Structures are given as C-alpha cells and as structure tokens.
Amino acid sequence: MKVYKCLIYDFDGVICDSVKLKTQAFETLYLSYGEEVVKKVKDYHLLNGGISRFEKFKFFSEKILKKNISENELEILGNQFSEIVLEKIINAPINPGVIEFIETNTSHSIQFICSGTPHEEMNYIIKEKNLEKYFDGVFGSPTSKTKIINHILTQYELEPNQVLFFGDAMTDFNAAKETSIEFIGIENEETNFPDKTNTIKSFIELINNYE
C-alpha cells in the first residue's frame, strides 16, 4: 500500500461498529408516527450515511411528515437522539484491524477523524473510547466533510495526492471527490460505491499488505 502523509477516517462504520445503533435511534424517535414513516426514516438514513442528524431531522419533518420544524424542535430531537445512542456508541466495539492499522501508520502519517456526528459529541466519544492519542484532530458537524478536508489540506500544507480518506457512505466518497483526495470505501450492505472504487471489507486486508 502507498504511504500517505495524511489519513482521514469517518467514524461510524469505519472506526466503530456503530451504524446500526444510530439506525435504531432514528427508528425509536419516529415510532409514534407509525411503521410507514419509520421505514421511510430508516431508508433515508441508510442511503445518506455521514450527513448531519440535524439535516436528516429537517428532511424527515419537511419531506415525510410535511411540516416545518423549528430550531428549538431540532435541538430537542438532537438531545433525545444523543440520550438514546451516546453511551451505546461509547461501549460499541472498534472494527477489526482498525487500531493495528492506525498504529502501523503513526510514525509517518498524520491522522484525523472527519464525521457527520456533532463536533463536541464526536470529541467526547473519542476521549471516552481512549482513542485521543491516535489522532491529530477530530472534526464533526455542522462543518461539512468537504470543508473539513479542505481545512486539513490548507492547515498542514498538503497536496491532495498525499491524503487518503476512509469512508463507508456516498457522502464520504463525494467529499473525497470534491477535494480531489484519494478514497477507500468500507464495504457494507447499504452503500453501492461507483464501479472501480477501491474498497475493503475491513482494515485487516490493509494490515496484511504491510507484512
């Protein structure tokens, strides 16, 4: 595998086995609206991984429930979502091979988290999971992934071909494309990356390339 000066990782589904936990949290929040709404919420969430939960709440309200939503209502939903899922994510397992891969690259690559999770919450999760030592920065929403990547490129004076982004959603793929950095997709049941996209089932595949 090529050596990169900078490695960037999405979190849910890439670093941590936590995608299903967030899916369940969205389902729980909309149970009172009935099975049809819950299915639409679930389907949209799975097709739009990596997008801020607040953008999803707006979509669910305006496009599915056909009603406007206030900033106060968004904040309430965000708090309820965190209450449901935060401790579960902190206790969720790290994906196979992730720590070994990160440690293998520590000596020659700066490494970052770029997530759709709210910035403060993402930093809290990283701290509680004792992962702080591995990353040079942890970034979350409301800043978009494209803006986060551009910030890293500028701040560390990096060329796009020196940077690799690992993601499990089209949001990640598109952010990499928009910033001209290289991309590896983490395979899952929900995301169909475009043909010829480099993908892996787990980081164990990459660790084996170093041996």
Image (tube, rainbow, N blue to C red):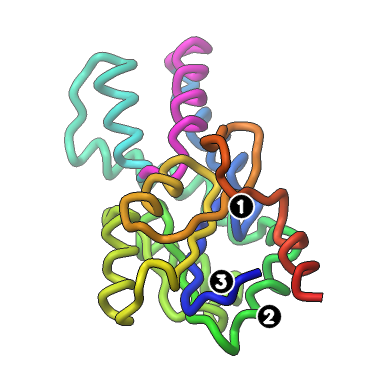
First-in-chain label (3 vs 2): 2
What crowding class fits label 2: few (fewer than 14 Cα within 10 Å), some (14-19), or many (20 or more)? few
| Structural crowding at the residue carrying mark 1, measured as other residues with C-alpha within 10 Å and reported as few (<14), some (14–19) or many (≥20) | some
Query: Which amino acid does the dot numbered 1 rest on?
Result: Lys
Does dot 1 land on a helix, a strand or a loop? helix
Q: Is residue 96 above or below residue 69?
A: below
Query: Nearer the viewer's eye, disc 3 or disc 2?
Result: 2
Query: If you read the primary sequence from the N terminus, does the residue marked by circle 1 or circle 3 appear first?
Result: 1
Amino acid at circle 2: Thr
Which residue is pictured at 47% across the width and 59% down the height?
Answer: 182
Specify the segment rendered in magenta. Answer: 33-51
Return the residue at label 3. 128
Please give the name of the residue rendered at 38% of the width and 50% of the height, measured from the top-left corner. Answer: 177
Front in this rendered view, residue 121 or 75: 121
Q: Badges 3 and 2: C-beta atoms under 8 Å apart?
A: no
Instruction: Give the image quarter of residue 140.
Output: bottom left
Question: Which residue has dot 1 on it?
Answer: 88
* Residue at (47, 48) in percent of width and height: 83
Amino acid carrying label 3: it is: Glu
Residue 187 relative to residue 79: left or right: right
